[in-house]
Amino acid sequence: MTQSRPLGSLASALPFWLSLGFVPILAAGTLWGGWWLILPVLYSAGLFSLLDWFTGLNKVNPQTDAPLDQLFWYRLITLIWFPVQSVLIYGALWWVTHRGTLTGAEMLVLFYGLGIATGAVGIVYAHELMHQKTASERWLGDLLMAQVLYSHFRSEHLRVHHLWVATPRDAVTARYNEGFWHFFWCVLRDCPRSAWRAEVAMLARARKSRWSAANPFWRYAALQAGFLLLAFVVGGWLGLGLFLWQALIAVLHLELTNYIEHYGLTRRHLGEGRYEHVLPRHSWNAAHRASNWLLINLQRHSDHHYKPDRRFPLLQTYATEEAPQLPLGYPTLLAVAAIPPLWRRLMNPRVRAWRRQFYPDITDWSAYKAGTNPMPRGAG
């Protein structure tokens, strides 16, 4: 992959600010309803799928030694998104329950679109923020996850997923031939317990009780309760129901993304519960230019797992010799993944090709098929 010029200018960062496009289109849907309500879907899935087709792949890698001050304009969009998202959620709740004329069906469609924004943008930004060392950024990540009632994701992601990705001990590594809806149910069932166990184990190593104030689950619970209470205060029972609906849609988009990122990929088992080090080959890579703008390079996922502390503007893309490549960007693949037969037809041949390329000596992959894992989902 070729190297780009140094980062630092506002112009180079602006494409990553396209998430703000959700603001006017959600405002239009809130105010006017009708056909305006389909704009979030057309924007996220339609426009960016089309832009991916026109703009192609971005195989240019930035310089990884760029100082933090050169990343200001990139980081800023992640720092301002929480207040933007808060206005979108609670402004829409107040308007539709006090001043708006939307029908019940229109409200559901509106908050479905809002869930796309809180999931495809809010959770993606929270993911970036929770990986950083500064307390302010990690707090912003917690606030964004609390607004979709999925705060345990931080513990699960940092304490479990990054340790056990592409192994049977990771609940959010989709098994070969596993359909999304089975995966979704397993993740909803297993990940909160897995995250709790991981935090309790860390507290025990520090000689602290699970009931200690250091357990982040108490912070998670307080933040989520606060946002639920605010939704009720702003919009009553209807507002609370609509808040829950957008949270569900956001989580659905998150887990569709998780499903795509590691589907069918596994690390070599070295015996006695040990696995090889995480390599770029253990995540699907996508170099599609436009969808990486919207998702702040989340699709350069192979590098994220290889170097988890690397900020999104510095993430690298890989050639087929080093990492498996997705045929399309996430905005298109989310729809495909929701239809298991179509997904298997598209991706199963690619998983088998990945196995032949990187692990030609392994002939029995049955232990990694859905339902026949050597360890239960979420263990560890």
Image (cartoon, rainbow, N blue to C red):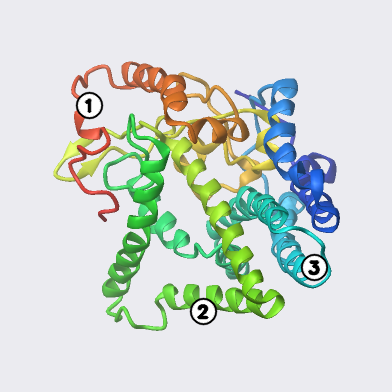
Q: Residue visible at 71% across and 32% down?
A: 46
Q: Which of pointers 2 and 3 lies earlier in the amino acid sequence?
A: 3
Q: Position of residue 303 (x, y in %)?
A: 51, 37
Vertical relation: 226 (above or below) 32: below
Point 52% across, 38% down: residue: 301
Q: Earlier in the sequence, mark 1 or mark 2?
A: 2
**Which is more foreground, mark 3 or mark 1?**
3
Please tell me how crowded label 3 is: few (under 14), some (14-19), or many (20+) other residues with Cα within 10 Å. Answer: some
What amino acid type should be assigned to the residue bearing mark 3? Trp
Q: Nearer the viewer, residue 345 or 82?
A: 345
The quadrant of the rendering that contains the N terminus is top right
Q: Residues within 10 Å of mark 2 (few under 14, many from 20)?
A: few
Left or right of residue 41: residue 369: left
Q: Quadrant of residue 64?
A: top right
Q: Does residue 152 lie above or below 177 as drawn? A: below
- Mark 1 secondary-structure assignment: loop
Please tell me which residue lies in front, 298 or 51. 51
**Disc 1 residue type (three-letter):** Trp
**Residue 347 in view in this figure:** yes
Q: Which residue is mark 3?
A: 95
* Residue 8 visible here: no
Give the mark nearer the N terminus: 3 vs 1: 3
What residue would you read off at disc 1? 365
Check disc 3 and report its element: helix, strand or loop. helix
Image spot of residue 232 (x, y percent): 64, 77
Measured in 3D between alpha carbons, the distance from the residue under mark 1 to the one under mark 2, in whole angstroms, is 43 Å
How far apart are the two marked residues, 3 and 1, measured between alpha carbons? 54 Å
- Residue 211 image point, x, y percent: 33, 82
User: For mark 2, what is the residue?
Assistant: 222
